[in-house]
Amino acid sequence: MTGLINMKQDGGLIRNWQLHHLTLPDIEGFEEQFLTTFPSALLDPGPLKFSGTVVEDSAGRYKPGWHMISSYICSIDRVRGVIETMNTIYKVIDEGNDELPDMGNDILNVLYKDPK
């Protein structure tokens, strides 16, 4: 045992999730800078984010039924239904990937606000 404690928060349960494959800009040195800034980000071949519908959020950021977008994904375990991002560990409770198309970089333009 290394003695390290996982400090990532529990993101709760997400359904109807969808992966979004992002494309890094074709700018000299950008990919290297991205990897320096986000060393644990999973690349496939570019970075990934995911979105989905919140069932429950133990961190209290989202209400049930709200749509969410993650930070960059570090790992995906489809067998266990777990997606780990830069700062959160989510449990996904369905197969995902068949509700919406992959929005790619367009997912970065979707903004959500409290509907109050």
Image (cartoon, rainbow, N blue to C red):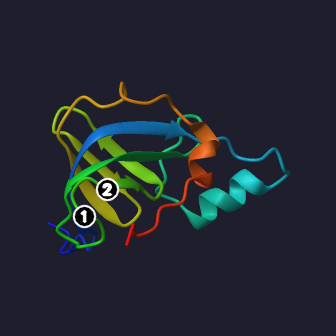
CA gap, disc 1 to disc 2? 6 Å
Residue 7 placed where, x, y %?
Answer: 26, 74
Q: Is residue 114 above or below residue 56?
A: below
Task: Count the labels in the image.
Answer: 2
Q: Is residue 96 above or below residue 15?
A: above
Residue at the image point whose x is 20% and y is 39% from the top: 81
> In the rendered structure, are the residues bearing label 1 and label 2 in contact, judged by CB atoms less than 8 Å apart?
yes
Q: Mark 1 is on which residue type?
A: Lys
Q: Is residue 115 above or below residue 79?
A: below
Residue at the image point whose x is 21% and y is 58% from the top: 64
Q: Is residue 19 left or right of residue 11?
A: right
Residue 113 placed where, x, y %?
Answer: 46, 67
Residue 69 placed where, x, y %?
Answer: 43, 54
Between residue 36 and residue 100, name the one nearer to us. 100
Between residue 44 and residue 112, name the one nearer to us. 112
**Disc 1 marks which residue?**
63
Q: Residues within 10 Å of mark 1 (few under 14, many from 20)?
A: some
Q: Mark 2 is on which residue type?
A: Trp
Q: Residues within 10 Å of mark 2 (few under 14, many from 20)?
A: some
| Quadrant in the rendering for residue 4 | bottom left
SS class of the residue under badge 2?
loop
Q: Is residue 73 left or right of residue 3?
A: right
Quarter of the C terminus within the rendering? bottom left
Q: Residue furthest right?
A: 28
Residue 36 placed where, x, y %?
Answer: 62, 64
**Disc 2 marks which residue?**
66
Residue at the image point whose x is 49% and y is 53% from the top: 41
Q: Is residue 12 left or right of residue 84?
A: left
Residue at the image point whose x is 15% and y is 39% from the top: 80
| Quadrant in the rendering for residue 33 | bottom right
Q: Residue furthest top?
A: 98
